[in-house]
Amino acid sequence: MKSSSDTRKPYAGLIRSLVLALDVGTTFSGVSYAILEPGEIPKIHGVTRFPGQEHVAGNSKIPTIMYYDSEGKMMAAGAEADTPSILSLAEDEGWIKVELFKLRLRPRTMKLNMNGMRLGPLPYRKSAVDVFGDFLSYLFLCTRNFIRDTHANGASLWRAVEHDIQFVLSHPNGWEGAQQTKMRRAAVYGGLIPGTNEGKARIRFVTEGEASLHACVLNGLADDVLSGSPKSGFLVLDAGGGTLDISSYAIRAQAPLVIEEVAPPDCVFAGSVFVSRRARELFQEKLKNSKYGTPDAVDHITKRFDETTKRLFRDKRDPQFISFGSPLDKDLSVGIRSGQLKLSGAEVAELFEPSVKAAVHAIKAQIEASSGMIKSVFLVGGYANSAWLFSQLQERLEPYRVAVSRPDTQTSKAVADGAIGFYCDHHVSARMSKFMYGVEYLRQYDSADPDHVERKDRLCELPSGLGFYLTPLIGVKVKESTVFTRKYCTELTSLSLLSVFEVEIWCYRGGNTIPKWIMRQAEDFSTLCLVRADLSPLSSSAEAKTGKHGRVYWNIVFSVEIHFGLTEFKARIKWVDNVRTSFVTYFSSLTVSLVQGVTK
């Protein structure tokens, strides 16, 4: 099978444009881009030169770290924030180091076990969104300078496209509309786009799992699997610093290439950073009675573990040595000789074990959810470079007859490249919804129904009694073009309320059994977004009715449409105004900011 770059269609736009994919990872970040020339096939490029990395040719990733001064001003970021001169200056000036800030944007429903460690403080008067925006701004500036300096007539090229650049932001599989909202706000804060609706429309989102899929297709990986039977599925495991993003797919057509999700994607906090956190705890305990047990010394040893042992470890039968000092550094009581800390292979394997178990458990769940379709696993992402993780997945998935492979190309830049592939090729045509969604529904009170009687205290003072329950609209695989529509009727005692009419979209996370009632205080229920519309044109055609107590009210009929097949949730209200259909449309990431994180 040809790679997608061989089958990619020429750019159909009329003017030159530019699309940037910004991959802000928990520990490392990168940028890819494509210059879109009318009539020409887009080619993916990577930003391979960043400040502080001039001595490393072709390095496409930088550390996701920043330093701020006491006034909340960013002083250094990326690779240059990790140079000896900046480290010394930061210590002298009392700058605050900010790292792992991406974890602060996670959904409240995604639990994070930090093994007793806490995220560091945010800079003065900065929110997590502000910090994310600062880093986006830094990546954007680096990209602008790279394109100007690298391409022929780069300065004029940038001037031609800078006011209409398209952006693709990648995020973990488990992130939802609220997180997309925060990322969009961060892009506005960082100066990538204006805060107008037109500016916000220039941001697109893709999950890290789907971006990794496009990277796999882009590189023509595992042709025998991708060109196999439609009943044979494959799984992409993007193993990053913070999360393991798991997505399962099957090929449905080859010309053109059509891919569908065969199980709801998954995301678990079990990335490489948690291996490092467990290692730091181990060193802290092992060295607590040694002169090498100071916080600075433990931090340095942990950093050396990250750079060497964590990447190279492959056999728990072999002792491991972390080189951190000079030949004069020695403390035999804790295993330090000639500037090296000795660990048993079993100790190091134990540091990886929770992460390996989480990956295997998630993959087995995907195999079950796909009815056994999964036969291959592609391991990508920075953490994929771990020989131990790779070998353990191979060993533990062998009984399930699942083959595990990883590309021989640069797996760490898979998400950024794949995000551009997503923009250009758009191979995935159907996705699986992980939860159930719906709206509150008004029902006539039935005194013969025990469920209604039990909830009698929840009746509202309307012309007719009512109860609340969740009307599920989706919990299955959906095509990108599929629209789920349900008609509803509400009662209003004043037509003036039509000018601010809104519908609350609910999300249920409690399993596959359809709930009859919305439990507003339960953790399984939360508000996904609000869809607002001005229905005042209906006031001229609405028919007045008289209720039980002589109160006049109006029945208003409308429909709620939900589009789930896209990478971004979309909902709209539709109504008929004098035989003319009208509607108002919202993307959840544009509206959910009003109610994000609220559980009723």
Image: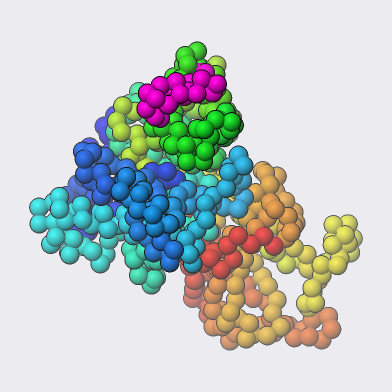
Whole-percent x, y for residue 536 in the image = 56, 83
Whole-percent x, y for residue 176 in the image = 52, 53
Q: Is residue 520 magenta?
A: no
Whole-percent x, y for residue 124 in the image = 48, 64
Q: Is residue 134 visible?
A: no
Q: Is residue 335 magenta?
A: yes
- The residue drawn where x is 51% and y is 41% is 295
User: Would you place residue 430 above or below residue 216 in this image?
Assistant: below
Whole-percent x, y for residue 336 in the image = 48, 23
Which quadrant is the C terminus positioned in? bottom right
Q: Is residue 492 left or right of residue 592?
A: right
Marker count (numbered): 0
- The residue drawn where x is 21% and y is 44% is 54
Q: Is residue 59 visible?
A: yes
Q: Is residue 291 left or right of residue 148?
A: right
**Colouring chosen for the image of the structure:** rainbow
- The residue drawn where x is 43% and y is 66% is 71
User: Would you place residue 346 above or below residue 367 in this image?
Assistant: above
User: Would you place residue 236 above or below residue 415 in this image?
Assistant: above
Residue nearer the viewer, 304 or 361: 304
Which quadrant is the N terminus positioned in? top left
Residue nearer the viewer, 272 or 418: 272
Magenta stretch bounds:
321-345
User: Would you place residue 328 above or below residue 65 in this image?
Assistant: above
Residue nearer the viewer, 232 or 49: 49
- The residue drawn where x is 70% and y is 76% is 491
Q: Residue furthest left?
A: 152
Q: Which image quadrant is residue 201 in?
A: bottom left
